[in-house]
Image (tube, rainbow, N blue to C red):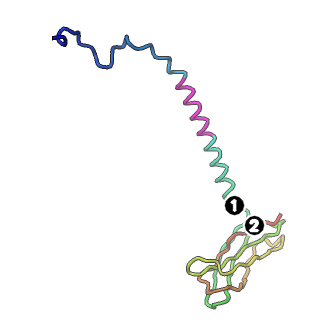
């Protein structure tokens, strides 16, 4: 038979059947360099986003108490500690039990106030369940 006379050969061939491999060191270096540069760019971008998203650390705000018993009005007592040389604007927001906004109020605090404790009242379009300080920031 013809199959017995043939010399057994590997199915995929022998190493001599293929050309030499190119040097992989240069390709690996370039790949590592590209991955490293991309990592630095993404880490730097993420760091910038986190740094800029921290808000204004120079104005501190805190809710002391709020009263949302009336169906058309809420009151809030809060503290703001800010800059002595700049005025501050705070946005107060009332929400209902589904967290839908039912009223807002913008409160302006004059420059030089430093520590301020305020009691404000705002009208609502429906029964509020919570009142919060949405933001406080210095006025430019």
Residue 88 x/y as whole percent: 79, 70
Q: Residue at x 27, y 14 (%)?
A: 9
Q: Callout 2 environment at 10 Å: few (<14), some (14 to 19), or many (20+)?
A: many
Q: Quadrant of residue 54?
A: bottom right
1 sits left or right of 23 in the view: left
Q: Quadrant of residue 2?
A: top left
In this view, the residue in front, 68 or 66, is: 68
Q: Secondary structure at mark 2?
A: strand
Does the stretch in magenta take in 28?
A: yes
Q: Residue at x 33, y 16 (%)?
A: 13
Does the stretch in magenta take in 45?
A: no
Q: Which residues are magenta?
A: 27-40
Q: Is residue 22 above or below residue 79?
A: above
Residue 51 x/y as whole percent: 67, 53
Quadrant for the N terminus, please.
top left
Determine whether label 2 and label 1 are within 8 Å by CB: yes
Residue 64 x/y as whole percent: 64, 79
User: How many numbered badges does the structure rendering display?
Assistant: 2
Using the image, tell me which numbered label, if any, was put on residue 55.
1
View extreme (front): residue: 1
Q: Residue at x 64, y 77 (%)?
A: 101
Residue 113 x/y as whole percent: 81, 73
Q: Quadrant of residue 87?
A: bottom right
Earlier residue among tags 2 and 1: 1
In this view, the residue in front, 111 or 9, is: 9
Q: Is residue 91 above or below residue 67?
A: above
Q: Main secondary structure of the magenta part?
A: helix
- The residue tagged 2 is 137
18 sits left or right of 114 in the view: left
Q: Residue at x 67, y 57 (%)?
A: 53
Q: Secondary structure at mark 1?
A: loop
Quadrant for the C terminus, please.
bottom right
């Amino acid at each position: 038979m013809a199959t017995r006379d043939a010399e057994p050969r590997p199915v995929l061939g022998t190493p001599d059947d293929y050309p030499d491999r190119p040097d992989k060191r240069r390709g690996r270096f370039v790949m590592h360099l590209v991955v490293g540069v991309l990592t630095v760019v993404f880490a730097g971008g993420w760091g910038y986003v986190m740094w800029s998203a921290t808000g204004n650390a120079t104005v501190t705000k805190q809710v002391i108490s709020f009263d949302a018993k009336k169906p058309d009005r809420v009151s809030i007592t809060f503290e703001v500690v800010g800059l002595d040389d700049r005025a501050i604007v705070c946005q107060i927001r009332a929400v209902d039990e589904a967290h839908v906004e039912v009223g807002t109020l913008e409160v302006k605090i004059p420059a030089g106030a430093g520590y301020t404790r305020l009691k404000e009242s705002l009208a609502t379009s429906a029964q509020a369940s919570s009142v919060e300080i949405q933001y406080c920031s210095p006025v430019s």
